[in-house]
């Protein structure tokens, strides 16, 4: 895990591993010239800082892409507040109300952890941290662009106090920890292991000089007076300084010893639960990385502003809005996919149906049956037509008169006692029956013709060309043309006659 | 240059994005698919009609089989009037045997075999002198109408017994046929060429007694309805048979005569031949015909 600390001057990175309440430091890096991008807590060049960090990561071959981040800036403030035992939401409201600085923070994000719980007073002391949401999002964005994900975001002082309160040497009595960060010296007061007070002081003296030690002693003296006057403590048990150099520490130790010989002065690194990866017994040079290492004290699930930032009501509201948009998009997407899918399914179903119908049309068995059906139909039609043809032919054939013995009998009856007749020829086309009649005189012949004319049932027309007297036989001769009626005429005439009789009756 | 988007801009962009996505889906996916569906629906409708027609036809297959058998029986019943298709040898043999059995001598026989269907027309009585002012309805029309009536009755029976389908078939055919009959009736004595009726024209010279010859004519008229006498003429043979033993002239019936007689023998195709011809005409492309 990477622990990252940033102030207005430098960016410090510690590559370390938390192990058995200690931090195993593997590598540490310092990136200077941050003041080109951050001035008095204000970020003036996001993209530049992001690229600067990215290049730094690349140059040092740092593979880790997630980090715990703590910031020492005027944009983030921590404060010990006494709050009653109330709910979390009300506690946050209480803290917001207590922060005077909140008035100049547009979108405050608050985190806190309980320092101690005074059940007698029914109150508890919390270390509350507040920062502008834009500040948090700016750093999250900067590191994100550099390819690094911030898992925690906290105030450096809050992290350090949280880290130090678990150190056994600070659990008893009143102890002061002096941590220098460049020219800034931060004093932390622990009473009974609880973080009680902190202050920042600018150190103007050169390090490793007696003046530096005097300034440190003066700060301890001021703290002692403040603690006594405020009733927080009557005496100071020990002072731990972040100085690593022995000569500088000597000046500090002597200066504080001159102030109060009972105060124990020690190096912070001796009690700081951080070890170098070179060997657990060898304490690392932690002076420059105290804040970075203390970021390990931040719990991303409970304390970090990142969590509060994420659970910020406004953020939740926007998240809700985002969720609504995502949900709407999902609904629209699902609707689009569903409608497309349904249309495609319908299309495929239609295509399948069409294929089935076409397959049915092309089925050989059905085609054979249909062929049989059409053959039958054509056969029926041709047979019916042919049958009608036959009927017509029969009816036509039957219309022709029969020039048989019955006709001869009729002719004989007409000629009986009048003349001799002989049928000479017959033509069916016009029903012409040629009769040769001979008689003793012309009178019987005319009677014969008259009789023939009476037989209109059998003859439709009678024609003759006149008489001829034949000297050889001394007889009169005439050729008579009798045109026969159709065969059905007599019956029809009889039928008509019977119908007329019925009508008369 | 950086442009800061307001919430309103973001909202409008969001709405625009949604609209664009919906429009893209509608335009590129749904509309083409809908067009294809519409096209498929039209195809399905067309094919479905064909399938329905198929189903309807298949449902009537058994009916058509039965109707075909009925039509065949009906045709065969009508065809019984006619001779089957015979060769010249068979016709010669039949007529010669007939005349010989009647005691006649066939002195000459000439056949004209048909090459196609015969032309048939009904007899029209000679009315040149207008002896009868009122002409009766021609028998041809009566017979034809009777034939049509017969089929109409048949159609009605089928419709009653077997459902409407066979009745529809007959009614359809007969309505068409009725139009033909009507046309024939109005055309008067115009002849009709039948596809299934053939005629053989035979000219014979027969010799024998006049009585035997007349008997032969009567038999032909009454016992052989499919043979019709188209013309005949008599020629008396001047021999000893014209007088009796006393030298008195014999009655005409006993005298020897030559009878020149023309007959027409009608034949008809079998039902199989009719249906085969129909199938051939259906299957043969027009170019081949």
Image: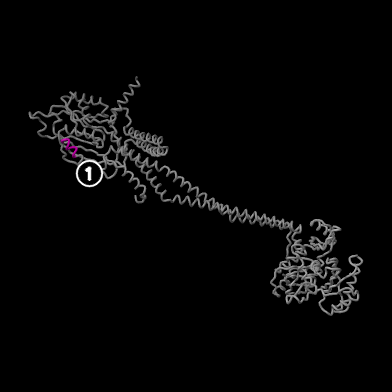
Tell me the chain of label 1: B
Quarter of the image for residue B242 reads top left
Q: Position of residue A84 (x, y in %)?
A: 84, 57
Classify residue B81 as left or right of residue B51.
left
- Residue A248 visible in the picture: yes
Classify residue A186 as left or right of residue B33.
right
In front of the other: A454 or B169: B169
Q: Is residue B139 above or below residue A339?
A: above
Dominant SS type (magenta): helix
Image color mode: one colour
* Magenta stretch bounds: B96-103
Mark 1 — residue?
B88
Q: Secondary structure at mark 1?
A: helix
Quarter of the image for residue B66 reads top left
Classify residue B27 as left or right of residue B55.
right
Residue B99: say if magenta: yes
Q: Is residue A317 above or below residue B110?
A: below
In front of the other: B10 or A353: A353
Q: Position of residue A180 (x, y in %)?
A: 83, 73
Classify residue A347 as left or right of residue A361.
right
Residue at 71 percent across and 75 percent down: it is A60
The quarter of the picture where the N terminus of chain B appears is bottom right
Q: Position of residue B121 (x, y in %)?
A: 30, 37
Quarter of the image for residue A65 reads bottom right
- Residue A103 visible in the picture: no
């Amino acid at each position: 895990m990477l622990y990252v600390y940033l102030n207005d001057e430098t960016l410090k990175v510690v590559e370390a591993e938390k192990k058995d309440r200690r931090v195993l430091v593997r590598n540490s890096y310092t990136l200077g010239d941050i003041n080109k991008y951050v001035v008095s807590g204000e970020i003036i060049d996001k993209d530049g800082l992001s690229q600067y960090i990215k290049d730094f990561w690349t140059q040092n071959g740092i593979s880790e892409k997630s980090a715990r981040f703590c910031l020492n800036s005027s944009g983030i403030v921590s404060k010990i507040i006494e709050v009653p035992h109330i709910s979390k939401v009300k506690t946050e409201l209480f803290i917001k109300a207590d922060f005077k600085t909140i008035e100049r923070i547009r979108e405050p994000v608050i985190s806190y952890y309980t320092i101690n719980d005074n059940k007698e007073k029914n109150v508890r002391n919390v270390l509350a941290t507040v920062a502008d949401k834009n500040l948090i999002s700016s750093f999250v964005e900067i590191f994100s662009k550099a390819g690094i994900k911030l898992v925690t975001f906290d105030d450096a002082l809050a992290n350090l106090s949280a880290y130090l309160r678990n150190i056994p040497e600070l659990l008893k009595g009143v102890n002061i920890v002096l941590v220098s960060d460049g020219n800034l010296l931060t004093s932390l007061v622990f009473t009974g292991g609880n973080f009680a007070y902190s202050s920042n002081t600018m150190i103007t003296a050169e390090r490793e000089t007696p003046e530096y030690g005097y300034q440190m002693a003066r700060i301890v003296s001021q703290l002692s007076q403040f603690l006594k006057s405020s009733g927080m403590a009557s005496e100071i048990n020990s002072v731990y300084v972040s100085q690593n150099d022995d000569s500088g520490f000597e000046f500090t130790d002597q200066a504080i010893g001159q102030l109060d010989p009972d105060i124990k002065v020690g190096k912070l690194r001796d009690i700081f639960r951080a070890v170098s990866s070179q060997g657990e017994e060898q304490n690392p040079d932690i002076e420059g990385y105290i804040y970075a290492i203390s970021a390990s004290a931040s719990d991303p699930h409970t304390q970090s502003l990142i969590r509060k930032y994420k659970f910020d009501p406004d953020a939740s509201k926007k998240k809700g809005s985002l969720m609504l948009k995502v949900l709407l998009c999902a609904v629209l997407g699902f609707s689009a996919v569903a409608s497309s899918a349904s249309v495609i399914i319908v299309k495929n179903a239609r295509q399948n149906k069409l294929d089935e119908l076409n397959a049915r049309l092309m089925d050989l068995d059905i085609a054979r049956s249909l062929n049989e059906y059409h053959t039958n139909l054509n056969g029926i039609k041709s047979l019916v037509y042919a049958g009608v043809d036959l009927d017509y032919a029969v009816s036509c054939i039957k219309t022709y008169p029969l020039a048989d013995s019955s006709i001869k009998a009729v002719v004989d009856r007409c000629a009986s006692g009048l003349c001799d007749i002989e049928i000479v020829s017959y033509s069916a086309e016009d029903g012409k029956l040629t009769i040769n009649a001979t008689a003793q005189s012309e009178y019987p012949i005319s009677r014969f013709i008259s009789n023939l004319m009476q037989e209109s049932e059998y003859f439709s027309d009678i024609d003759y060309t006149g008489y001829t007297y034949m000297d050889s036989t001394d007889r009169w001769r005439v050729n008579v043309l009798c045109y026969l009626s159709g065969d059905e005429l007599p019956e029809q005439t009889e039928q008509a006659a019977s119908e007329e009789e019925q009508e008369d009756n | 240059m950086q442009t800061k988007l307001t919430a309103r801009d973001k909202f409008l962009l969001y709405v625009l994005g949604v609209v664009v996505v919906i429009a893209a889906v509608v335009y590129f996916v749904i509309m083409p698919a809908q067009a294809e569906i519409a096209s498929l629906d039209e195809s399905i409708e067309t094919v479905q009609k064909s399938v329905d027609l198929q189903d309807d036809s298949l449902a009537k297959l058994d009916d058509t089989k039965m109707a075909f058998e009925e039509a065949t029986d009906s045709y065969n019943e009508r065809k019984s009037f006619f001779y089957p298709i015979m060769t010249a040898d068979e016709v010669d043999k039949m007529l010669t045997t007939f005349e010989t059995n009647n005691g006649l001598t066939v002195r000459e026989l000439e056949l004209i075999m048909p090459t196609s269907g015969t032309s048939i027309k009904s007899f029209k009585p000679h009315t040149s002198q207008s002896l009868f002012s009122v002409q009766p309805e021609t028998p041809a029309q009566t017979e034809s109408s009777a034939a049509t009536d017969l089929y109409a009755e048949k159609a009605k029976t089928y419709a009653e017994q077997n459902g409407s389908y066979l009745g529809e078939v007959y009614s359809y055919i007969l309505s068409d046929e009725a139009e033909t009959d009507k046309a024939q009736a109005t055309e008067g004595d115009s002849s009709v060429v039948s596809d299934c009726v053939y005629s053989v024209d035979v000219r014979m010279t027969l010799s024998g007694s006049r009585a035997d010859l007349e008997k032969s004519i009567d038999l032909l008229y009454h016992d052989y309805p499919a043979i019709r006498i188209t013309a005949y003429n008599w020629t008396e043979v001047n021999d000893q048979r014209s007088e009796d033993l006393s030298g008195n002239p014999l009655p005409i019936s006993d005298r020897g005569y030559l009878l020149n007689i023309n007959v027409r023998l009608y034949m008809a195709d079998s039902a199989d031949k009719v249906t085969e011809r129909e199938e051939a005409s259906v299957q043969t492309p027009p170019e081949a015909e």
